[in-house]
């Protein structure tokens, strides 16, 4: 279904009301969705579809994924979290994953930024330079 | 000592951990050569994007939640969910003399199978045109080798002259003739050893044309031995709309390199109507608002920023120039349609080709009344000014009288005279394709016309008379022609010599 301009505008407004000091508030999001479904305003499906998209993009933007070849220690996890927090501000959802294909090192992806310090990336960089 | 070791160790580990930051996005949707990408929060307008395995994109729409990019290259290999990286670079093409003689695509990659290109530099495809300070008024001629144009609608180096007409009226032919003539002039100039001689390099940009047409143009250029001074940029009908719309900008970048390095170049955009159509398609797929004839609102800017890049640069900045001959196709001779009026208003004049004239056998079918060059005789050598000064007015008057004279037979002697002269001038200006005429021969022939030597020749025999006169002059009076070429003006002595030569020819002509 194609969302209309009005629906997109409404969704955006709702999305902004869900923010508490710049960060998305989960309970507010749930409340908004519940309220919209209960009241069924004109074009509410479109509004919710776009609302979902905005929430998804916001979550993506604040999702940090740290990949490593071997499981990282608790201490290192804490230090990575702290460093990312310094750089990107509070509210980051950091997840850790193991990806043996990296061979060694870390690959950190925050939103659309990628910091690739893995051995694999360096090898492919080297390969590209030939 | 141990301190030092620790320091070094710390520094080494610092180097090792310095990883560069990259900005990536995910393709959400891809259709018609346009991709919608999520993420890419750092993307800049007109930045090159890397889709991996050699496919590049260009970020054109930066929206709140996504980036709209056109794909240059094979867009069929791109799939949803694919990762895209920013590159931090503007789209650039290779430029330099290494491209001469080559056929390249919109990205400057060779498509003629003659191996890699040795470029001198890379130039961004979108570049701001030279400013007012750097420019100079147009004052040196570009000889097209087409007598009707060189005599009546002269083109100067750095000028933008539109070639406009219906389909099949000989627009491409004028462009090709002009390129052939530049190559010939370059050859003569280089052979003469004249230090001040400035060659003109050609760039032919084929946009949205049939591959067979492009191949035909290249074959003609090769046959005339003109490819050595020419770059062909081809985005044919089978290339994506994005490639077609960007190709003229690539060509302009290649031309600018010559201009920036103090050389002269000539660029032919064949044709801008098709480019506008390709741009309309890209804009509609990117969901930009459309205006008149469904073209996006900035289609004027598309052409104005392209054509503004042609300029004549002053001596202080290298004295280079880039002359543009854009081609626009009209429907049923309608010059008041959207794209034609736009481009007419941007350029410094137009050569209007008429279907009626074409089918009457007047080829090149240049309409004298509707064609102008706003630079005018500033771009002619003095000799040409001397012999062609009044021609345009005379011919326009003839066209008017000819229509009028169909109704009556009783005409006064003066009108008869204008009609007879006009018929002969029209004949003289007919010219076969791919056969440009050197300027000294043009001057000599027009001098003969102005001094009434053609008046007692039958109209049917004018072409024969002209051909034999040309042959006589080139074989028997070559030094006279050389004098016209080098002195660039007809003084009394030259006039007397011309008179003697033509008189001698008249004696022998049967
Ligand atoms: N001066 C000329 N003398 C004889 N034939 C000519 C002349 N100029 C063009 N022609 C012929 O006219 C035809 C159309 O020419 P051309 O392809 O240059 O036209 P065009 O306007 O570029 O056409 P299109 O709209 O298809 O691009 C060609 O077959 C060409 O051979
Ligand atoms: Mg053509």
Image (cartoon, coloured by chain):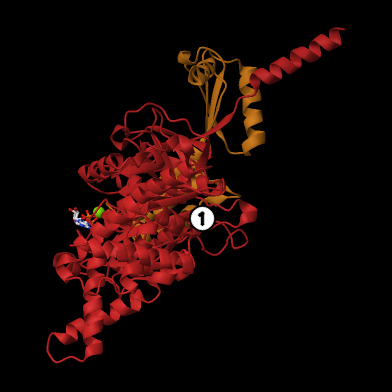
Chain colours: A orange, B red
Q: Is residue B168 above or below residue B51?
A: below
Image quadrant containing the N terminus of chain B: top right
Residue depicted at x 77% and y 13%: B8
Task: Say whether residue A48 is visible.
Answer: no
Q: Quadrant of residue B275?
A: bottom left
Query: Tag 1, which chain?
Result: A
Crowd around label 1: few <14 · some 14–19 · many ≥20 (10 Å): some
Image quarter where ligand 2 lies? bottom left
Q: Is residue B310 visible?
A: yes
Task: Give above or below for B189 relative to B140.
Answer: above
Instruction: Using residue B118 as the reference point, say whether residue A79 is left or right of it.
Output: right
Given residues B311 and B346, the one toward you in this image is: B311
The secondary structure type at the circle numbered 1 is helix
Which sits in the foreground, B398 or B95?
Answer: B398
Residue A5 is situated, as x and y percent measured from the top left of the image, at: 37, 60
Which residue is located at x 12 percent, y 89 percent? Answer: B409
Q: Position of residue B397 (x, y in %)?
A: 28, 82
Quarter of the rendering containing residue A71? top right
- Horizontal and vertical percent for residue B161? 39, 63
Ligand 1 closer than 8 Å to label 1 CB:
no
Per the image, the residue denoted by label 1 is A17
Q: In the picture provided, is B413 more to the left or to the right than B77? A: left
From the viewer's perspective, is B266 left or right of B507?
Answer: right
* Total numbered circles: 1
Frontmost residue, B399 versus B493: B493
Q: Which is nearer the eye, B439 or B307?
A: B439
Query: Image quadrant of residue B380?
Result: bottom left
């Amino acid at each position: 279904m194609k969302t209309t301009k009005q629906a997109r505008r409404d969704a955006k407004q709702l999305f902004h009301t869900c923010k508490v000091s710049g960060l998305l508030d989960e309970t507010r999001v749930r409340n908004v969705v519940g309220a919209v479904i209960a009241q069924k305003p004109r074009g509410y499906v479109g509004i919710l579809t776009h609302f979902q998209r905005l929430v998804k993009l916001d979550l993506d933007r604040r999702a940090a994924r740290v990949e490593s070849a071997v499981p990282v220690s608790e201490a290192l996890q804490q230090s990575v979290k702290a460093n990312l927090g310094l750089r990107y501000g509070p509210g980051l959802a950091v997840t850790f994953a193991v990806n043996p294909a990296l061979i060694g090192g870390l690959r950190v992806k925050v939103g659309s930024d990628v910091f690739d310090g893995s051995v694999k990336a360096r090898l492919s960089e080297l390969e590209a330079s030939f | 000592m141990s301190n030092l070791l620790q320091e070094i160790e710390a520094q080494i580990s610092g180097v090792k951990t310095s990883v560069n930051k990259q900005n990536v996005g995910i393709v959400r949707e891809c259709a018609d050569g346009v991709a919608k990408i999520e993420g890419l929060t750092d993307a800049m307008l007109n930045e090159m994007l890397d889709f991996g395995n050699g496919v590049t994109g260009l970020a054109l729409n930066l929206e709140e939640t996504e980036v709209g990019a056109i794909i240059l290259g094979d867009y069929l290999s791109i799939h949803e969910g694919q990762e895209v990286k920013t590159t931090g670079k503007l789209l650039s093409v290779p430029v330099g003399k290494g491209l001469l003689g080559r056929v390249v695509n919109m990205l400057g990659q060779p498509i003629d199978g003659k191996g890699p290109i040795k470029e001198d530099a890379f130039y961004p495809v979108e570049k701001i045109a030279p400013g007012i300070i750097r420019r100079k008024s147009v004052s040196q001629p570009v000889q097209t080798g087409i007598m009707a144009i060189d005599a009546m609608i002269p083109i100067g180096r750095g000028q933008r002259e539109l070639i406009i007409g219906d389909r099949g009226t000989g627009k491409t032919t004028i462009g090709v003739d002009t390129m052939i003539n530049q190559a010939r002039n370059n050859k003569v100039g280089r052979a003469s050893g004249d230090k001040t001689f400035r060659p003109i390099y050609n760039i032919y940009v084929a946009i949205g044309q049939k591959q067979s047409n492009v191949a035909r143009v290249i074959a003609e250029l090769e046959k005339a031995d003109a490819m050595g001074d020419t770059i062909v940029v081809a985005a044919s009908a089978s290339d994506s709309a994005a490639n077609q719309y960007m190709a003229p900008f690539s060509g302009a970048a290649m031309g600018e390199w010559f201009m920036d390095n103090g050389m002269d170049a000539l660029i032919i955009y064949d044709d801008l109507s098709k480019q506008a159509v390709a741009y309309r398609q890209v804009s509609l797929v990117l969901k930009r608002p459309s205006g008149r004839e469904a073209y996006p609102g900035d289609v004027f800017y598309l052409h104005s920023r392209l054509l503004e890049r042609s300029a004549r640069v002053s001596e202080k900045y290298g004295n280079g120039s880039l002359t543009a001959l854009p081609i626009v196709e009209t429907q049923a001779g309608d010059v008041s349609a959207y794209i034609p009026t736009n481009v007419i208003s941007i350029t410094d004049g137009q050569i209007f080709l008429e279907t009626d004239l074409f089918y009457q056998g007047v080829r090149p079918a240049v309409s004298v009344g509707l064609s102008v060059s706003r630079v005018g005789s500033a771009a002619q050598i003095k000799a040409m000014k001397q012999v062609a000064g009044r021609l345009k007015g005379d011919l326009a008057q003839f066209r008017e009288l000819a229509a009028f004279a169909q109704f009556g037979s009783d005409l006064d002697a003066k009108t008869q005279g204008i009609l007879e002269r006009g018929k002969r001038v029209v004949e003289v200006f007919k010219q076969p394709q791919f056969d440009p005429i050197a300027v000294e021969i043009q001057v000599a022939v027009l001098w003969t016309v102005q001094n009434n030597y053609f008046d007692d020749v039958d109209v049917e025999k004018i072409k024969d008379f002209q051909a034999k006169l040309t042959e006589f002059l080139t074989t028997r009076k070559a030094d006279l022609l050389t004098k016209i070429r080098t002195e660039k003006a007809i003084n009394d002595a030259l006039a007397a010599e011309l008179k003697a030569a033509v008189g001698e020819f008249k004696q022998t002509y049967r």
